[in-house]
Image (cartoon, rainbow, N blue to C red):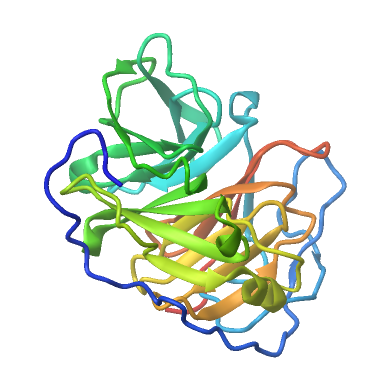
């Protein structure tokens, strides 16, 4: 499977766990936030839903900040952090990228890919090599572009990863050590992969996708650890300090942290405070931020979870 530009064979090291068996673990209780009953999720909300948590998380069980987002980001679908620490986000129907103020949640600027903006089902964003920015659609089409000024219309390149017949894509992260984009599949089309969480690596150097998944894990094992039924990833992020893989599952309102070999380190329910968790990013101080689309009477918003372990 290759992109539109072929530059030799994929050259990523093989980090896949293959058919690694994930041992079932005892499910320990942990705190998560309850919905505060208001149109936005408030700061310092009391914890609720103590089921399905596993110790070892890099992040606190409860958020310490929450920002409501403007209506322009009601369908926020992905987050990424620039090398100088600014937060970028995007909606899922048009290729418009916004810089989000981490003090207020306000939009600092927005720019689009093309004029009019490219339309599509955009499911993830990542900041890659030399500040290149990538968006990906649910069919695996990648867009590569440079950051633009406010109201700018920037040029872009497109690449077909070849994932369209393999899975429905919903998540993108950059792995600097491997110079690759990690792509998360929400659902796999092959029957024998239906209960597998599969991540693929697309090399930014060769512009090719690995023929096999970069990482696989049992969806049933992750779901059992989190205390939910099923696990369908809606976001992927790589923690730069540990290499740990952070996965969200909007449908199940759950989160999991995997070691690079695919073993489960932590898993928990996100609870009703997260109506539809679609994006995640690691801030420069190591904290985790999670973006939720507007749904179930709640505004779109961003929640910050402090880091508690290195």
Residue at the (33%, 15%) spot, across then down: 153
- Which image quarter: residue 223? bottom right
Pick the residue in front: 211 or 111: 211
Rendered view: 114 above or below 47:
above
Q: Residue at x 16, y 40 (%)?
A: 6
Q: Residue 75: percent from the left, percent from the top? A: 62, 32
- Residue in the image at 27% along x and 24% along y: 156
Instruction: Name the outermost residue toward the left.
Output: 8
Residue 114 placement (x, y as % from top left): 35, 15
Residue 229 visible in the displayed image: yes
Relative horizontal placement of residue 50, taking residue 290 as reference (left or right): right
Q: Is residue 24 left or right of residue 237?
A: right
Is residue 305 in sight in this rendering?
A: no
Residue that extends furthest to the right in the rendered view of this protein: 37
Whole-percent x and y of residue 22?
A: 55, 83
Q: Residue furthest front?
A: 191
As drawn, 206 above or below 226: above
Residue at x 51%, y 74% (from the top left corner): 58
Say left or right for 215 vs 191.
left
Q: Is residue 76 above or below residue 62?
A: above
Is residue 127 positioned above or below 21 on the image?
A: above
* Spot occupied by residue 183 in the image (x, y as percentages of width and height): 42, 52
Numbered marks: total: 0
Quarter of the rendering occupied by the C terminus: bottom left
């Amino acid at each position: 499977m290759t992109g539109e530009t072929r530059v030799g064979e994929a050259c990523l090291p093989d980090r896949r766990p293959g058919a690694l068996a994930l041992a079932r673990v005892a499910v320990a209780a942990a705190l998560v936030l309850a919905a505060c009953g208001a149109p936005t999720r408030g700061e310092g909300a009391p914890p609720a839903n103590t089921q399905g948590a596993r110790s070892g998380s890099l992040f606190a069980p409860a958020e310490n900040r929450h920002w409501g987002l403007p209506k322009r980001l009601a369908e926020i679908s992905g987050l990424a952090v620039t090398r100088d620490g600014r937060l970028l986000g995007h909606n899922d129907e048009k290729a418009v990228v916004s810089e989000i103020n981490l003090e207020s949640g306000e939009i600092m600027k927005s720019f689009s890919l093309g004029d009019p903006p490219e339309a599509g089902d955009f499911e993830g964003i990542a900041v890659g090599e030399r500040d290149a920015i990538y968006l990906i659609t649910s069919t695996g089409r990648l867009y590569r572009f440079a950051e633009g000024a406010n109201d700018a219309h920037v040029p872009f390149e497109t690449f077909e990863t070849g994932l369209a017949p393999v899975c429905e894509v919903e998540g993108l992260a950059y792995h600097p050590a491997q110079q690759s984009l990690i792509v998360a599949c929400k659902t796999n089309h092959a029957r024998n992969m239906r209960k597998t969480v599969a991540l693929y690596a697309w090399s930014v150097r060769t512009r090719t996708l690995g023929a096999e998944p970069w990482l696989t894990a049992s969806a049933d094992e992750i779901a059992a650890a989190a205390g939910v039924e099923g696990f369908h990833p809606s976001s992927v992020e790589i923690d730069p300090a540990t290499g740990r893989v952070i996965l969200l599952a909007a449908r199940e309102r759950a989160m999991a942290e995997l070691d690079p070999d695919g073993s489960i380190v932590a898993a928990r329910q996100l609870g009703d405070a997260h109506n539809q968790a679609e994006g995640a990013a690691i801030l420069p101080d190591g904290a985790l931020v999670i973006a939720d689309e507007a749904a179930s009477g709640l505004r779109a918003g961003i929640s910050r979870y402090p880091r508690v372990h290195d």
